[in-house]
Image (cartoon, grey):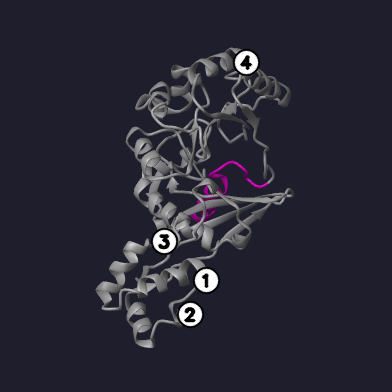
Amino acid sequence: MKQPLLGLTLTELQTVVKNLGLPGFAAKQIAAWLYDKKVASIDEMTNLSLRHRALLKEIYEVGCEVPVDAMRSVDGTVKYLYRAGEGHYVEAVYIPDEDRATLCVSSQVGCKMNCKFCMTGKQGFTANLTANQIINQINSLPERDKLTNVVMMGMGEPLDNLDEVLKALEVMTSSYGYGWSPKRITLSSVGLRKGLQRFIEESDCHLAVSLHSPVPLQRRELMPAEKAFSITEIVDLLRNYDFSKQRRLSFEYIVFKGVNDSLLYAKELLKLLRGLDCRINLIRFHAIPGVNLEGADMETMIAFRDYLTSHGLFTTIRASRGEDIFAACGMLSTAKQEENKEELI
């Protein structure tokens, strides 16, 4: 089985050409074909000699793979399903919005975090995605040339696969890669002790922390990861860094009816985040099978937002998109895996 070139950093490409006896400058040529011209085969790399292309093809391939399925929403959102190894799938969601087009990218097949409200967590953990599989979600996206932003908010916990995620972020932001500003990319995390500090120090991308409750005991019920690294410890760590300039820090807060939607929780949020340069994104809950949580109504969310904003904490309500196409993360891939199991029976 041939190894993919897509997703390799320039340093890794330099190792490839050195091992094959190609000239050093070939690494930058290959990077340009992969990330600028976005070729699908080594044969298209026409400024490499035929002999050098033949040498490359003995071991390598470009390694791009188109989505195997797509679901389109009435609002223009498209959920794509990508193969990730035998019988496994991950999702990427394309969200067009006036002058912006955002892609929500996955970092793992399944997830270890087992958050109560998340369909991906119900799958359990299967595998980390490689940088190739992460970048392929962008490279093979039919609308890739319209993209303005990427959010690492799909299936999986990015900080639990940080080596491969950082490689993918390097490809996205480096001049040899896509050359995007880090301000176009946001990584979302429940907050893992060892990964959080490393991500902040090794990347300039925006950070979004899944908060969902300012009360540690309640957060632990919703998010078992709270046991290992509490939200108070996360906030203490974040206070050591400057988020007042271009880099943005936000907290995601799914508003559950009768659980975390009263103004008592808004007051606790203000206490927890006091003095931290950040914003809150309130999110409507998409119901998932077998979970006894409901989303709060819009009137409650507006009151919650207005209370926080009036007390100096910039708060927005994230618009719900793609509700008619298995919008919640993990639902389409779960359906596909179940379908495959039935075919095998």
Give the image location of residue 168, x and y in percent.
42, 54
Q: Are marks 1 and 2 in contact (CB under 8 Å)?
A: yes
Residue 86 visible? The answer is: no
Q: Mark 4 points at which residue?
A: 262
> Cα distance, mark 4 to mark 1?
52 Å
Q: Which one is closest to the eye, mark 1 or mark 2? A: 1
Which residue: 37% across, 52% down? 164
Q: Which amino acid does the dot numbered 4 rest on?
A: Ser
Instruction: Kindly tell me whether residue 14 is visible in this rendering.
Output: yes
Instruction: Answer with mark 3 or mark 1, whichever residue precedes in sequence.
Output: 3
Where does the image place residue 151, in percent across and percent down from the top left? 53, 46
- Whole-Å distance between the Cαs marked 2 and 3? 18 Å
Crowding at mark 4 (Cα within 10 Å: few <14, some 14-19, many 20+): some
- Magenta segment range? 325-344
* Residue that carries the numbered disc 1 in the rendered image: 37
- Classify mark 2: residues with Cα within 10 Å, few (<14), some (14-19) or many (20+): few
The residue depicted at 37 percent of the width and 40 percent of the height is: 201
Disc 4 is placed on an element classified as loop
> Cα distance, mark 3 to mark 1?
14 Å
Q: Which amino acid does label 1 sit on?
A: Lys
Q: Which mark is residue 44?
A: 2
Packing grade of label 1 (10 A; few <14, some 14-19, many >=20) is few
In this rendering, is residue 133 above or below 13? above
Decide if residue 11 is on the left or right side of residue 279.
left
